[in-house]
Structure formats: structure tokens, C-alpha cells
């Protein structure tokens, strides 16, 4: 749901926040977890339109949380050297190269192109240079349009654990290692984790992972130790462009809706929010994003659903089946001739 989807204006109810008016009632996850006097739910709003791909958030996260080095391996598709979230990468900056029509900022309708072929075209000999009209030699893709503007653009986004409202990892953890904090975030206690790995396939975003040689599950804690002393998470503190914004989730949702509205007025009509709505398949995320293209482009699932959604029905069906089998067994013995 974007700001344009909620353009209807109405008088807010007494005590209702603007975030509730925009996005609907927000679940009290901390209260449901046993914190009657919990502070406001905290979270992240990542505005990808101002991310410069500096990876300061990745470095700050590793330094503060003592996350071990997991190697610097380029994907072969971009300058991304961390590839994805995992037990040793709690923040991951995605690099997506796109080609767009000359003179347009929209991601819509861009054709597939080998950006490395385009880059090689820039480094050709003077004899092979493009003519002054801006055209390219035969067989080459010109990455520069006639007016000098590049046809290649970068989409960058710092990904992280979403700290879901309905967190499947919490549902499947048999030891209570995963717990909901008073700030509404989801944290793993490594001293309780037994390495069963149930939480790994349960996460609809593929965030949580087991550390190689360790076996225990690790992921972003939203710097729980810093929150307890009134500090913001290390990644948000290190972000030089305020792409990663931290604060009460209701305030962040209001700020994000205003940002989308301003972008739409400026002509960036493809701007949209992802993970902000409590009506989605996970009840809304504690870490949500402003995107300039479809979620799949950023490696995000388009319609995430809590993987334990159908567990109650499954257990009910299993119980009915067990009772039916027991009844059939008893009936067979009762009817058996002596």
C-alpha cells in the first residue's frame, strides 16, 4: 500500500495516530509478548532512493556486533561482495544495475542488457569511439544517450531482518531462544539456541541462518543492547545519507508516506512502500522499505506470508485424524466376534 492508495481523508478517532489512519490499526506485539508497559515499537525505514552503496552499515554492524568476516566474493553480476543476508552478514547492500530509456528516470519498460558489454564499450579505442551524435559503433550498446545522460542506473538497498509482526521463527523455535523484546523486535539468544535449524526454512525472507562450524542461528538484533541504553542501532548511526532511518514505527510509517507523496509529485511515480502494511502476509514488518521497482528486483518476495499461518488447521486435521483412527480401532475390537 502506498500513500496514493490511502488518499482518502477522514477525521481520526480520539487517540488514533496518523499512521493508524494511513495504514490501519497496528498490532501491539510487545504487549502480546508480555510487556504491559512497553515503549513504542521501534524499527527501520530504509529509503533506497538516497542509498549510495557505501556499505558503511555493513561495516558498522559487523564491528558493533562482533560479526565475523565471511569473505569478500563478488557475485559476478555487480559490485556486491556480500551476496546476501546470512549468519555472518546481518546487513546486506544490494547493487542492481538497470538500463532505462534515455531521458527517463522510470524503471518501467527497461530492456535486458549486459551491463559489462556496455561498460567495455566506454573503454574502446579512439577509432571506435561513438560519433558526435551520440550513436554507437555497429554491434556495440551505447550506455550514453545523445544528451550525455547515462542509460544505466544503480538501484541500491540495504537489506536486513524484517522483525515481522507475525514472526514464524518465533513460532517454530523449540527452546525459546528466539524471543520478542519490549521494543517489538525479534532477537536470538545464542546461549539457548540448540542449532536445530527449524527457524531457517520458517523465515519467509530467508534472513536467519546457521553459522558454519557453529550450528547456532544468527541474525540482526536491531542492536538490542544499544536500544536499552537509548542509542540508535549501529547501522543507522553510520549511514551518511539517512537512507536507514530508525525510530518509533508509527512515526517512520508517517514519514515514509509523506516521502512517497513527494516523490510522486516530483514525477517518480514508480516509488512505492514495501512491508509497511499490517494487512500483508506477515502483519507488517518492523523494517520496511521505499523501493523504485518491483520487490523481486531487489531480491525481496513480492507477497511474503508467515510460513506457520496454516499450522493451527494442520494440527486440527491431525487431531481429527488421530481421533478417527482411535475410534475405528476401538470399533473393530468391539465388533469382533468372541
Image (spheres, grey):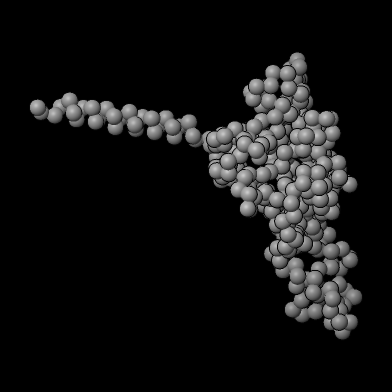
Residue 58, position as x, y percentages in the image? 79, 50
Q: Residue at the location (70% across, 50% down)?
A: 88
Up/down of 100 relative to 173, above or below: below
Q: Is residue 107 visible?
A: no
Q: Quadrant of residue 265?
A: top right
* Viewer-closest of 189 and 110: 189
Q: Residue furthest top?
A: 14
Report the quarter where the N terminus lies.
top right
Residue 57, position as x, y percentages in the image? 81, 48
Up/down of 227 relative to 129, above or below: above
Q: How many marks?
A: 0
Q: Quadrant of residue 12?
A: top right
Q: Is residue 40 left or right of residue 211?
A: right
Report the quarter where the C terminus lies.
top left
Residue 6, position as x, y percentages in the image? 72, 32
Q: Residue at the location (89% across, 82% down)?
A: 126
Residue 37, position as x, y percentages in the image? 73, 18
Q: Is residue 338 left or right of residue 108?
A: left
Q: Is residue 299 left or right of residue 231?
A: left
Up/down of 210 relative to 12, above or below: below
Q: Residue furthest bottom?
A: 127
Q: Is residue 150 visible?
A: yes
Q: Residue at the location (18% across, 28% down)?
A: 333
* Viewer-closest of 23 and 336: 336
Q: Residue at the location (63% across, 44% down)?
A: 217
Q: Quadrant of residue 123?
A: bottom right
Amino acid at each position: 500500500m502506498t500513500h496514493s492508495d490511502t488518499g482518502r481523508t477522514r477525521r481520526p478517532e480520539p487517540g488514533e495516530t496518523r499512521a493508524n489512519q494511513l495504514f490501519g490499526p497496528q498490532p501491539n506485539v510487545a504487549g502480546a509478548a508480555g510487556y504491559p508497559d512497553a515503549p513504542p515499537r521501534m524499527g527501520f525505514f530504509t529509503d533506497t532512493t538516497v542509498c549510495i552503496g557505501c556499505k558503511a552499515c555493513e561495516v558498522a554492524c559487523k564491528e558493533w556486533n562482533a560479526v565475523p568476516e565471511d569473505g569478500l566474493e563478488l557475485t559476478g553480476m555487480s559490485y556486491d561482495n556480500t551476496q546476501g543476508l546470512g549468519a555472518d552478514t546481518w546487513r546486506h547492500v544490494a547493487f542492481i544495475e538497470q538500463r532505462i530509456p534515455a531521458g527517463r528516470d522510470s524503471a518501467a519498460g527497461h530492456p535486458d542488457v549486459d551491463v559489462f558489454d556496455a561498460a567495455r564499450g566506454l573503454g574502446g579505442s579512439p577509432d571506435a569511439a561513438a560519433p558526435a551524435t551520440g550513436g554507437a559503433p555497429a554491434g556495440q550498446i551505447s550506455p550514453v544517450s545523445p544528451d550525455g545522460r547515462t542509460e544505466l542506473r544503480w538501484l541500491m538497498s540495504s537489506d536486513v531482518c524484517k522483525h515481522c509482526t507475525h514472526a514464524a521463527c518465533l513460532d517454530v523455535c523449540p527452546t525459546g531462544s528466539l524471543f520478542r523484546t519490549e521494543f517489538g523486535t525479534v532477537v536470538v539468544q545464542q546461549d539457548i539456541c540448540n542449532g536445530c535449524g527449524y527457524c531457517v526454512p520458517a523465515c519467509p525472507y530467508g534472513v536467519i541462518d546457521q553459522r558454519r562450524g557453529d550450528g547456532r542461528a544468527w541474525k540482526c538484533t536491531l542492536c538490542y543492547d544499544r536500544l536499552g541504553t537509548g542509542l540508535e542501532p549501529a547501522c543507522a548511526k553510520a549511514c551518511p545519507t539517512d537512507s536507514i532511518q530508525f525510530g518509533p514505527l508509527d512515526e517512520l510509517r508517517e514519514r515514509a508516506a509523506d516521502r512517497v507523496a513527494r516523490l510522486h509529485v516530483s514525477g517518480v511515480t514508480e516509488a512505492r512502500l514495501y512491508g509497511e502494511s499490517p494487512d500483508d502476509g506477515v502483519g507488517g514488518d518492523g523494517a520496511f522499505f521505499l523501493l523504485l521497482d518491483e520487490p523481486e528486483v531487489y531480491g525481496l518476495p513480492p507477497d511474503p506470508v508467515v510460513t506457520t499461518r496454516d499450522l493451527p488447521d494442520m494440527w486440527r486435521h491431525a487431531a481429527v485424524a488421530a481421533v478417527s483412527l482411535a475410534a475405528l480401532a476401538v470399533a473393530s475390537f468391539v465388533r469382533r466376534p468372541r
